[in-house]
Image (cartoon, rainbow, N blue to C red):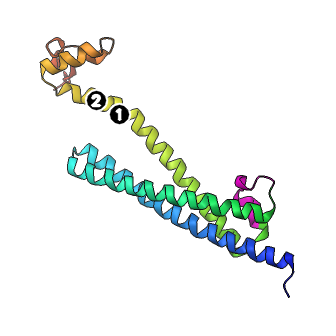
Amino acid sequence: MMTDKERRKIQIRNLAREVSEVLSRISQLHEQLSQVLVDLDEAAMAADYTALKKYRQLEGRLLSRLVDEERQRLIVSEELGDAIGLKIPSQIVIDDVVEMVPEALAVKLVALRDRIQGYAYALRAQNRLGELLTPHAFEHVEVFLSPGAQQLVGDEETDSPSSESFDSIDPFDRVDPSL
């Protein structure tokens, strides 16, 4: 007959495996999402609106699946935290588990955690880059607006240096005099 300690050990191992499976799916979704974000940037630079729509829809589906997987991770992780005996089971972290599971599973959990953190840092950097570039993109678009449309934009952004009317911009200011 199995003791309570042995049952608990098996329960922890099974829940840790389940967490590992969920983290693996989350990692795969982050990898796919990273590629979609690169594709979105490329489509935006090429002004390919069909591709933009396609990638935005794909991004939405991936994000929805990520939310579902995160919900599952929260449920299973809390069960694992409870099985381990944490005071607040929902605040479990991978380091709480690694000493209680077989080494191969512990290594896999740590690797998955590190991979997902890497995706999170890359996503943060990619979003930050987009935040920095977006205002400049609109300034470049403004150059191609008709003089009347530029005047409308200029009225909305009177304190912006790029809100000058088209007529007041000397096109030769940007020409290299050595040409």
Image quarter in which the N terminus is found: bottom right
- Residue 174 coordinates in the image, percent (x, y): 21, 22
Please say if 3 is above or below 100.
below
Residues marked 1 and 2 touching at CB (< 8 Å):
yes
- Identity of the residue drawn at 74% across and 56% down: 89
Report which quarter residue 12 is drawn in: bottom right
Task: Give 149 or 132, whichever is nearer the viewer.
Answer: 149
Find residue 134 and name its label: 1
Inspect this view and state whether residue 25 appears. Answer: yes
Report which quarter residue 84 is drawn in: bottom right
Tag 1: amino acid:
Thr
Residue range (magenta)? 87-98
- Identity of the residue drawn at 48% across and 48% down: 123
Mark 1: few/some/many CA within 10 Å (<14, 14-19, 20+): few
Mark 2: few/some/many CA within 10 Å (<14, 14-19, 20+): few
Task: Give 166 or 69, whichever is nearer the viewer.
Answer: 69
Find residue 93 and name its label: none
Task: Give 130 or 12, whichever is nearer the viewer.
Answer: 12
Report which quarter residue 86 is drawn in: bottom right
Q: Is residue 159 found left or right of 152 in the rendered image?
A: right
Q: Is residue 148 found left or right of 127 in the rendered image?
A: left
Find residue 138 and name its label: 2
Q: Secondary structure at mark 1?
A: helix
